Structure formats: C-alpha cells, structure tokens
Amino acid sequence: KAQPVDNAVAIAKADAPKTTTTVVKTDEKPNIAEKVFNGEGYWKLYNTNKQISKDGYFHGGKFMDGIIYQYSADGILQKKLVYKNGIYQGDAPITDDDKK
C-alpha cells in the first residue's frame, strides 16, 4: 500500500536543481593553502568568510556527494543541501554544532 506523500516535500524536490551546474565559485578555496582545487576527489571548500561552503566528493569539477552549505548575507547558516550522485536529495537538519 502506497504511503501519502507530503506535498511540501514533493514540491521542494520538484523545484530543486537535479544536478549541480555551478560547482565552485571563484571565491571558494580549500583551507589548505598549498592545495589547489582540481575538481577530483574529496574536498572541503570555504567561502571568503572562512565558512564551509562545500564538503564532499567531486568528479570532473562537479559536486557529486556531500553537503552544500548556504548562508544568509550576514553569514548565518540557512540550509544544508545533500547531494548524492550529483543529484539533490533534500535538506539536512542544522545541528547545534553547525551553529558554532
């Protein structure tokens, strides 16, 4: 027997990007200065405010698996977007550790 689907979740997933197109902004860099982002393997990237922007695995310059962090203009974490195989899966909860 099929379970009813929460319409808000279904609509949010329908409107969400299915694959990542813009992967790395010009101001996103790895925390380790001597490493240059090459678009392959595991990377943790940071924005100009030294906040994590992407944490996960890249292939061919595209974000494939992990979490993309979105912040408000004043630097407060707003969303954690979960990606699997390059496809948006939904939002992860923001924990107390994320707020530190």
Image: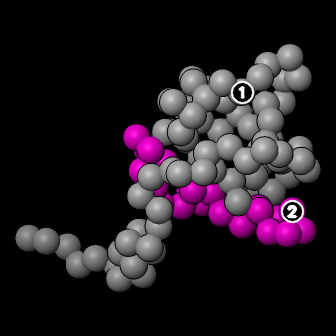
Q: Measuring from the top left, give residue 64's x and y in whole percent.
A: 49, 39
Is residue 9 visible from the viewing direction of this image?
no
Q: Which residue is mark 1?
A: 37
* Above or below for 31 versus 2: above
> Residue 15 versus residue 80: which sits nearer the camera?
15
Is residue 90 visible from the viewing direction of this image?
yes
Residue drawn 13% across the image and 71% down it: 2
Q: Quadrant of residue 4?
A: bottom left
Report the span colored magenta.
71-94
Q: Earlier in the sequence, mark 1 or mark 2?
A: 1
Membership of 82 in magenta stretch: yes
Q: Measuring from the top left, give residue 28's x and y in whole percent.
A: 78, 42
Q: Secondary structure at mark 2?
A: loop
> Residue 22 versus residue 10: which sits nearer the camera?
22
Q: Amino acid at mark 2?
A: Gly
* Above or below for 56 versus 15: above
Q: Measuring from the top left, give residue 41's x and y in whole percent.
A: 57, 23
* Quadrant holding the N terminus: bottom left
Q: Main secondary structure of the magenta part?
A: strand
Distance between the Cα atoms at labels 1 and 2? 23 Å
Q: Is residue 89 shown left or right of residue 39?
A: left
> Residue 26 versus residue 81: which sits nearer the camera?
26
Q: Which residue is mark 2?
A: 75
Residue drawn 79% across the image and 19% down it: 35
Membership of 25 in magenta stretch: no
Residue drawn 80% across the image and 36% down it: 29
- The answer to whether the residue labelled 1 contacts the one labelled 2, judged by CB atoms less than 8 Å apart, is no
Q: Is residue 23 shown left or right of residue 2?
A: right
Q: Secondary structure at mark 1?
A: loop
Q: Residues within 10 Å of mark 2 (few under 14, many from 20)?
A: few
Q: Measuring from the top left, give residue 77's x and y in whole percent.
A: 76, 62
